Image (cartoon, rainbow, N blue to C red):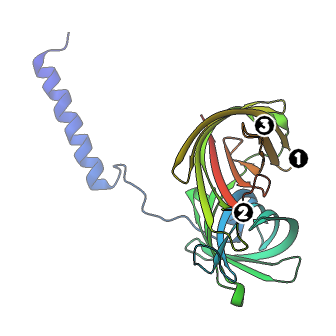
Amino acid sequence: MITKHYYKSIVRAALLLAVTMCITGLAPTFSTSAMAFDLGTLNGAYGGNNSNWVTGSGNGNGSKYFPNSARQLITFDGAGHLTIDQANNDFGTLIRWTVPGTYTVNADGTGQMSWIGPNGGFHLRDFVIVNGGAQIMSMNSNDFGESSVIGIGAFIKQLGTTFGLGALNGTYGGNNLVWVTVSGNANPALHPISSRELITFDGAGHLTNDQLIDDAGTIVRQTVTSTYTVNSNGTGQMSWTDPQGVFHMRDFVIVNASAQLNSIDDPDGGALAGVGTFIRQ
């Protein structure tokens, strides 16, 4: 049986030990050391989407900028070289290409990546590495002269090397923002559409999408069923026909060990550009 005197002795001993640990430096402390960054910090495949505005001759909203969005899969070799696989909705024109490039990393985790597009245009992107090297936040640098691109992107490590239909099996929730045009004139105005979506994949190529859509102020609720495909590198497509009979297609990339999808809307269905993020419940 523990007496009151014995209990007080235990408490005094515990307090003395704690004081001694603090004095001798044995007490636990929070680390103040920062992560060291270099080329090797980026090693593997990162998927994401990029949302941009590109200068042009003007649009019906009175602005000189047009929307542009891209689904990208960027593979870094840990030594300053990269390969970028891209599906780009360039104001209603879908462009697909894969090109090599280079990258640099500074000691503070900032850096740059660059590549030459298939048409000979130079592309430059500034970025910062976050989340222990698992994510990159970027902006497009002004390297296109009169056709400058203003935009931002987020890219997350795939954390997986084998992909198929079964990589998507379960329910993913997220949101999507799309730009379409108001028809009826040669220089149409831009028209925004946003949505909250709950997409359930069956692991065998079929999906159900529960959507709540804000069509420039008009709320639409609908549920559609359709199909999806997955490529061996973790990119893929999903498509459906809405209740009005309009066909829609989306390009996506699987990231974070199949826990997340980053997507763009293809021109099918009238989208000029659009990006979405969907995370497994």
Which secondary structure lies at badge 2? loop
Name the residue beneath numbered marker 1: 232
Q: Is residue 16 left or right of residue 143?
A: left
The residue singled out by tag 2 in the image is: 272
Q: CA distance from mark 1 to mark 2?
A: 27 Å
Q: CA distance from mark 3 to mark 2?
A: 29 Å
Q: Secondary structure at mark 3?
A: helix
Q: Is residue 12 left or right of residue 51?
A: left
- Disc 3 or 2, which lies upstream in sequence? 3
Instruction: Look at label 2 and name its amino acid.
Output: Leu
Where residue 179 appears, x then y in whole percent? 65, 60
Residue 234 placement, left or right of 278: right
Q: Position of residue 272 (x, y in %)?
A: 72, 63
Between 187 and 272, the residue placed more toward the observer is 187
| Residue at left offset 61%, top offset 40% | 197
Q: Is residue 200 above or below residue 245?
A: above
Q: Count neighbours of disc 1 (C-alpha within 10 A) and say few if under 14, some if 14 to 19, many if 20 or more.
A: few
The residue closer to the viewer here, 236 or 23, is 236
| Residue 264 position by quadrant | bottom right
